[in-house]
Image: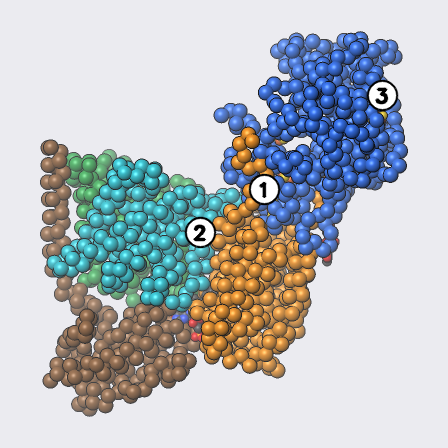
Amino acid sequence: MREMLSMIVVLTVLASVSGGLLAAVKSGTELRIEEQVLKFQKAPAIESLFSDVTNDPLKERFNLETGETTIQIFPGKMPDGSMAVAFETLGKGGYGGDIGLMVAIDMDKDQLVGARVTTHAETPGLGSRAKDDLTFVSQFNDKSLDTNLALKADNGTISAISGATVTSRAITRAAIEAQTLYNDLKPEIMKQIQ
Amino acid sequence: MAQSLAKEFTKGLWAEIPPFRLVLGLCPTLAVTKSVENGIGMGLATTFVLVFSNLLISLLRNVIPTKVRIACYIVIIATFVTIVELVMQAYTYPLFLKLGIFIPLIVVNCIVLGRAEAFASKNNPVMALADGLGIGIGFTLSLASLGAVREILGAGTITIWGGSPIFDMSNWFHPFTFMVEAPGAFAALGLMLAGMNLIGKK
Amino acid sequence: MNNKKLTVSHAPFWHDGDSLFKKNLNFIIALLPAAIFGVLQFGAPALGVLALSVSCAMLWELIINAVSKRPFTIGDLDAALIGLLFGMMLPAVTPWWLVVVGTFVAIFMGKMIFGGIGASPFNPALLGMAILMLSWNMFFDFDTAYVNYDFDFTALAPLVAVKFQGAATDLFPLSALFMGREVGAVGAVFSLGLIIGGIYLILRGYARWELSVSFIAGIVITAFLFHLVNPESYAGPWFHLFSGYTMLGAFFLITDSSSSPVQRIPMLIYGLLAGFMIILMRNIGSYADGTILAILLVNVVSPLLDNIRPTALGKDMSNA
Amino acid sequence: MEFFELAIGSIFINNIILAQFLGICPFIGTSKKMETAVGMSMAVVFVMVMAGMITWSVDTFLLKALNVEYLRTLSFILVIASLVQFVEMFLKKSIPGLYAGLGIFLPLITTNCAVMGACLLNIGNEYHFTKALMSSFSYAIGFGLALILFAGVRERVNLGPVPKPLQDTSIGLVTAGIIALTFTSFRGMV
Amino acid sequence: MIKRSFFMLSNKPRLTCDLLETDPEAPLKMDVPGLLTLLLPEPIDGKRTALIKKGDVVEKGQKLLLYENDTQYAVSPVSGTIKSIDTFTVDEVSGLRTRITIEKDDRNTEHVGYTDMPEDLSFAAQHLNQLPGAPGFDGLSRNGIQLNALVITVADTDLLSTTSQYVGTAHAAELEKGVQILKRITNLSKVYLLIPGYLLERVQFDGVTVMPASLNYPDTLPALVMKNHLDKILPAGRTPEEMGIFFIRAEAVVSLARAFEANAPVFEKCITLIDKTGARHRIEAVIGTPLSSIFSQLGIQIDEQDRIVIGGAMQGFATFTDHHPVTPDMDSILVQDKGDIIPLSDTNCINCGRCVQICPADIPVNLLVRFLQTAQYETAADKYDLESCIDCGLCAYVCTSRIALSQYIRLGKHELRKLRIDA
Ligand SMILES: Cc1cc2nc3c(=O)[nH]c(=O)nc-3n(C[C@H](O)[C@@H](O)[C@H](O)COP(=O)(O)O)c2cc1C
Ligand SMILES: Cc1cc2nc3c(=O)[nH]c(=O)nc-3n(C[C@H](O)[C@H](O)[C@H](O)COP(=O)(O)O)c2cc1C
Ligand SMILES: Cc1cc2nc3c(=O)[nH]c(=O)nc-3n(C[C@H](O)[C@H](O)[C@H](O)COP(=O)(O)O)c2cc1C
Ligand SMILES: Cc1cc2nc3c(=O)[nH]c(=O)nc-3n(C[C@H](O)[C@H](O)[C@H](O)CO)c2cc1C
Ligand code: SF4
Ligand code: SF4
Ligand code: SF4
Ligand code: SF4
Ligand code: FES
């Protein structure tokens, strides 16, 4: 009985100390972690897309609910005064899993500002060129929203990275998803930006 | 005392260096050693957990009832793992992304629980500290050297914490990408192990 | 009573005279038609690749034998055969260092670390190729490899073209593929020569027909089914049979003895599985040609397959 | 179809051992003999499926509900450890035959990255319950497949005259690497 | 030596037993030499005093016994004096023998005690076991064995020998008499005559069931005869006698008839000898004659490194001395020039599969050999059918790697027996 009691006591004490400690560490790091995620995953892409915006899209970010997921919207004021938004979509079926693509869309002209790869696990030197070398994603620059953004091999307009068709196809999927998402969400976004 | 302390510390650096001599902790060894940087990061994270869990378990060794000792060890280890996880997320986010799932998996790393059960639970805190530190540093060295081999051959360069490469032969060398892929990880570890066997046991 | 030193050994005291040397020599002889054709079609660089590959393979084996203090084994021609097969799988314009490194990988990783001939469960030449293709993918792109050549046939790698442009195969008439009028690896394009060599080996009993036949059957059946479902995207069985590494695979790679099973039913399963995987990789996988990886993959299954075997005489009988 | 793709993907393409590097210690440790490999595979299937279901429920109904996701590592490992203990006790009492076969492997599984890893992957991929179950099962089958294939090859390799410094673990790792290479065959198929 | 044929789709070499000429010549009689050697399949025990010793005078037909109550014995083929008794090794798995050397004298005295030989099995086992053809009557009379059939083999079991075919046909009348005696002493009515089809017309008598023997090697080996003709599978690791089938050479049966006719044992052994050129000699030599004496009478030169094979190319053994004597079971002698010997090697199996295709016992030799090479004899027996092997030697004959497969197999069985005895 004594043994039983000591077992329970020790385990309970240990677990509560552990829980308390972790809660403390968690609350101490929470804010910083959120910043880091932005800084390393989203910020480079956004900064690259919105290089000459007059506001701070990171600060002005807001969330939108679509069905079961939440997406983060980064609004940008273009130098010519028009409004643009950037948000991230996932392209399914890359060589090493899904590929994150940050897409920026000019809301006045209804055309793409551009797109940048955020997260990926593609082969270094092959699929990873989609992120490191902007030739491929720069094909999305200034494309109007009704352009077919599929690969040429799939009857679209985008040329694949040679040696990395799989990566390219996943990225085009993400871009196409961004088109539809934007079309669905445009009214909501408009409301939020006002 | 000092002598045996030194012995406990140094055994982790050669005689029982994981994962070469202690064939444990293979998953992170293979998964994260695409580069020296990842290897060192993983090694240090593991060392942190190893040292503190060894210390705490040794301190509590007379309090913890034998019947639930494994559960207690796991709680202690998992606590430190979570701390590492949160701290890395907050302060070394890019590294955290690269190591991914293998940070939480330190909790099941056979080395950590193995040291707890085999050493820390039977020795005084100073010894346990030396043991944890030795094994941890040995593990870090192993991961770093495996990372170095794989990064040099597989990428042609070595880059640590951003900046320009500290070693670069990519101007004449087409990277032997096999080494940074999954199959190359196994093969490189296997061949390095053979090299260690060749140099001699103990 | 003078006692002479007689030779004392064990039964049987006869041997049919076959040897590793003869087996390997016959493989090499059977490869010659396709190799010579490759040299004629792709010129001196092709000869250079083959010569370098054979000599490097033998040299690596010699060096490894010397360093590991084991008896020299290049006399059995196994290294030469690995080198020749390896060279025949390369494009004619392969850089020299790639051949040097590749033969080292094949001989060292594919053979010597397991203990030499027969001890490796993988085909060394294929292992070397797979590791090289994984690492230096750009040197195995047959479309760019031959840009400086002037051919009187379509200078596109057939499998790559079909994979990415659909099965509009009138660019590649079967007769051209069959006669080697295509770009590709030095020793893999001339289907006719490979078939002749393969049939020679089978008739002489050096290659086991079960392996070749089931391999070809696996390809034909799978490709036929795909083609039936969607003739637009998936080429027909004959196209697959005479393009890429298929024929080299059917007669010289799948028939490698150390890495294949020996019982009849396992051999048939093994070949079918390899053929099936190749077409799967070509039609829905990431690779344009899957021969190399598919055969390596079935190498892994081979030890398991060998457990399917007849009951031995009088096995497990009680005192009946 | 979605489940079929998930299964093919988890068994072959993202094989938990050969592509994800999870569970390598038991992979190397229990592959010297075919019987051991089969025993371990069965134990892993059993535990991985159970653990997958329980940890998914814990995560969804407890951690997420209470907003304490940072306790995931701690709670998952406790769940898995107690599950293994419980299964061990249950089998010992009720199905001694199976216990004799699996018993020695069960403790090994507690410290097996594959079980914990599969649970974490389910959460990371935001699978719903059925998908998590399916995925755990497929990962476990992939584990067993890789282990059994490896054991077959490894038995054969160990019978050969492998040079001294390479014997056993060393050549085992190289062989595993080559098997991982052959598994890249499946890339891109789903 | 039969080479691999050029085209070999089926991978089965057609090894056929040598045929007897239509009109065979009688064997060449060898002179009885001055010194003869007998081999007793039992080593001398240094601690016990043997019943026979150097200097003993023996008679022709005298039974030589090492110790009281031994079942193994030799029979002196001549009258003379024992010159030496020592230990003799045949090869590493066959164990030790006792070698008894006898100097022949001119007394020509015959041992008494054979008059009115009783027709019974124990007499045969105790006195006639060393007849030419090695009848093995001791096996017949062993306790605990229920015999139900006799198989008399006029076919030879190894490739080069025509001894059984010759004796069985040239002395068909004596064969018939011998069969009658055998039937009487064993009380067995089921008697089979295993004889190649082309010889059938030369041997015709009643009271036996004729089994036409195939000439393809190794169809005449007991396990395969049982399987093909008697529909009985020999369980792995068992002998035919244990299964109630007793195989006996035609020559032993003929010798039995002669012994009863003469009321004395006989010693003239018929042998097929193949010399270095491949030429065949049929000879008749007294048991105990050293081979060297036969070679010098036939003018066969034996050089260093040549090989003398006793008992057939596939299953026999190579002796280390050309003084090896003629023994009761020596059907053939093969002399090979050192230049014709293909050395076996110790490389690895390359899985070419030829052994598997040719093995009459369906053994996975390619797997078996790996376990034998690593000395895992119990696994080899439990899982890879070591004990099913009928020692035909075909696997080693075709092995591309030239692995000494039969040697590994024999050694494996030997070690396995030792392991089992220890256990
Ligand atoms: C080692 C290796 C890594 C690869 N990585 C990628 C990749 O990251 N992205 C990709 O789209 N394809 C990748 N592939 C696939 C091939 O490059 C190729 O099959 C491609 O899908 C089609 O080639 P193409 O675009 O030149 O026609 C890889 C192949 C290999 C061998
Ligand atoms: C033994 C040896 C091995 C070599 N291995 C490689 C190699 O693996 N990768 C490589 O890119 N260059 C290698 N080289 C370098 C080449 O000699 C040469 O520098 C290279 O082809 C130049 O590369 P580029 O012409 O493709 O830029 C090797 C050279 C030697 C002597
Ligand atoms: C250039 C060359 C070609 C040969 N061609 C053949 C051949 O076609 N078939 C064959 O069985 N042996 C061939 N041999 C093998 C040798 O003639 C010989 O058979 C070998 O050295 C071993 O012979 P053995 O049977 O006396 O051991 C060839 C050897 C050389 C050097
Ligand atoms: C491991 C590996 C194996 C490959 N195997 C083949 C092959 O068998 N045949 C082939 O044409 N390409 C092969 N490739 C190359 C790949 O399919 C590539 O897409 C084509 O070479 C494109 O032209 C392989 C690549 C890798 C990484
Ligand atoms: S030894 Fe006897 S059986 Fe043989 S041939 Fe001479 S007489 Fe006939
Ligand atoms: S000797 Fe060889 S071929 Fe003959 S039965 Fe034995 S294993 Fe089979
Ligand atoms: S014949 Fe020799 S090399 Fe061929 S499989 Fe049999 S043992 Fe192996
Ligand atoms: S075990 Fe083999 S070698 Fe030994 S006696 Fe029996 S058959 Fe002969
Ligand atoms: S480290 Fe993954 S199982 Fe041991």
Question: Which quadrant is the N terminus of chain C positioned in?
Answer: top right
Q: Colour of chain A?
A: brown
Q: Colour of chain D?
A: cyan
Residue drawn at the location 44% of the way across and 47% of the way down: D151
Characterize the local packing of mark 2: few (<14), some (14-19) or many (20 or more) Cα atoms within 10 angstroms.
many
**Left or right: where does residue E227 sit relative to residue C269?**
right
**E321 and E162: which is toward the camera:** E162
Q: Which residue in the protein does label 2 denote?
A: D149
Q: Colour of chain C?
A: orange
Residue D18 in view of the camera: yes
| Mark drawn on residue E33 | 3
Q: Colour of chain B?
A: green
Give the residue type at disc 2: Leu
Residue drawn at the location 54% of the way across and 67% of the way down: C220
- Rendered view: E36 above or below E337: above
- Contact? badges 1 and 2 (CB < 8 Å): no
- Rendered view: A188 above or below E127: below
- As measured in the structure, the alpha-carbon distance from the residue carrying label 3 to the one carrying label 1 is 46 Å
Characterize the local packing of mark 3: few (<14), some (14-19) or many (20 or more) Cα atoms within 10 angstroms.
some
Chain containing mark 3 = E
Give the residue type at disc 3: Pro
Give the residue type at disc 1: Ile
- Contact? badges 3 and 1 (CB < 8 Å): no
**E90 and E347: which is toward the camera:** E90
Secondary structure beneath dot 3 equals: loop
Tell me the blue chain.
Answer: E
Secondary structure beneath dot 1 equals: loop
